[in-house]
Structure formats: C-alpha cells, structure tokens
Image (cartoon, helix red, strand yellow):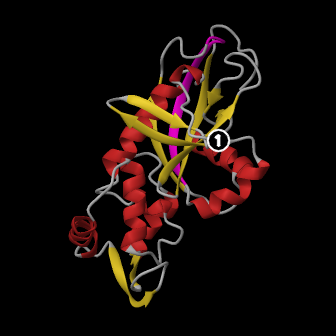
Amino acid sequence: MHPSLKQNQLYITVDIMIMTVRKGKLLLLLSKRKDPPYADHWALPGKLVEQNETAEAAVRRLLEEMLPGPEPYIEQLYTFTGVDRDPRGRVISLTYLVCVPWAKLQPFLPFSTFHCFHLTSEEERLGLKDENGDMLQEQSLAFDHGHIIRTGLTRLRGKIDYSEIGFSFLEDPQAFSLSELQNVFEAVMDSALDASNFRRFIRTRYEKSGRIKLIDKEEKRGRGRPANLYRLSDEQNDCVKGGAENE
C-alpha cells in the first residue's frame, strides 16, 4: 500500500487470509507493519490493485511473491467498504481465503516476514495465539482486519461440512486417510469429533455421492492398524486446485 493516498480518490486493495493446519491447529499468517498507519500492528497480507489488472490477478501476484509454487485454493470472501477503514483515504478491500497444506507452506516461512497464529473464536470473540500461547488482542490488528478474520473464519466453518474446502488443507488430496481429514475438520471447528460419527458422515456425504473414492490399498500411518486411503474425484480435485474465486 502506498504510504500516502490522494484525497477524493478511490483505491482498491486485495487482502488475503492465508490459512493452514498443523498439529491439530488452524493457523493464520500475519505480519507486523513497520510504517504508519498502524505501525507495530499485525495485519493480513495485502496489495493495491493496479489500474491494468483484475483483483484476482493482484491476488495471484501477491501469492507469487509470498509463496512460490503450485497455486493454492483461493476463494473470494467479501468486499469491505467501510468509509473510515483506512485513515489515509478511501480504500475498498476485496478479501480472499487462501487454504494451503502445511507441507507446502512451511519451506517458505523462514524466508518471509510472516508469523503463524493459532486461529480460534468463541461467541464472536476472535482468538489469535502466537507460538508461545500468548493471546494477540484484536486491537493489535491493523485496520478492520479483525472483522475480516472473523468473517473469514465463519465462512470456512460454515462451508467445511458440505464443500471441498477442507480437503485443500490435506498434504495429498489423492491419498489421504479419514483420520487425516478428521484432523482438519477438528482444527477448523476447534473441537473434538467422534470418530465413528465423523466416518459415517464422510461416507454418507462424500463417498456415496462419488466425491471421494476409496483407493485399493492400505497404508500404515503412525501407530495402529493400516488406514484405508481415499482420493478426491477428478472433478472435486479440480475444485480444490482452482478454488472458488467468485463464489
């Protein structure tokens, strides 16, 4: 974002919620701003949309700078138009959800300025904990990013049990166990799920409809019995790869 904005001119930015799942926790990437306004506040990654590009192109440009590699799941979230959301001038924010498997995100983190925060919420109260378990207060977030994050988390939780968005956190959507998928659901919902009920739900909602298919092999992952492996159908896998940008 430019340090100063012209008065009486409308600007458009893209702000993105990059999320991943690690060790049973839903993580969100934030960085600390160096310059005013909101110096030393935590913020979502964002970029000004140029005159000759679409918002989707600006998102991809930002992601290429941050996370080189295969394109992750991208979904348009909402347009935030608060008149006073940026003290420098009139700025509209087009926001996006980006879901990335930890294995694809982790290699780039040591070379970035971003930090992972455990994302939770209770009764509309936003919870962001750093790696030491210390809570980040919402007033420590820049602009209206607390509102954006709450909106994004609500969208993610609302869609996970009927769409393919949860599969985008899996390391390999073409070879996963139901335990791995349950770990994703529990991280997003921030609550434990009964294994039997979860498996029944997944088989009814996804397997019987052909959205996931059982692979003809078992693999031992960790302790216990070998796990049956599943894969997303080709059609659903394309959804995970490309996302739902304008949904």
Percent x, y of residue 216: 38, 91
Residue ranking furthest to the right: 111
- SS of the residue under disc 1: helix
Percent x, y of residue 202: 27, 68
Residue drawn where x is 76% and y is 19% of the image: 3
- Residue 54: image quadrant is top right
**Residue nearest the viewer, comparing 192 with 177:** 192
**Residue nearest the viewer, comparing 65 with 191:** 191
Which secondary structure type mostly characterizes the magenta part of the structure? strand
Give the residue pinned by disc 1. 58
Quadrant where the N terminus lies? Answer: top right
Q: Residues within 10 Å of mark 1 (few under 14, many from 20)?
A: many
Identify the magenta region: 87-99
Residue drawn where x is 35% and y is 34% of the image: 122
Percent x, y of residue 39: 71, 19
Amino acid beneath label 1:
Ala
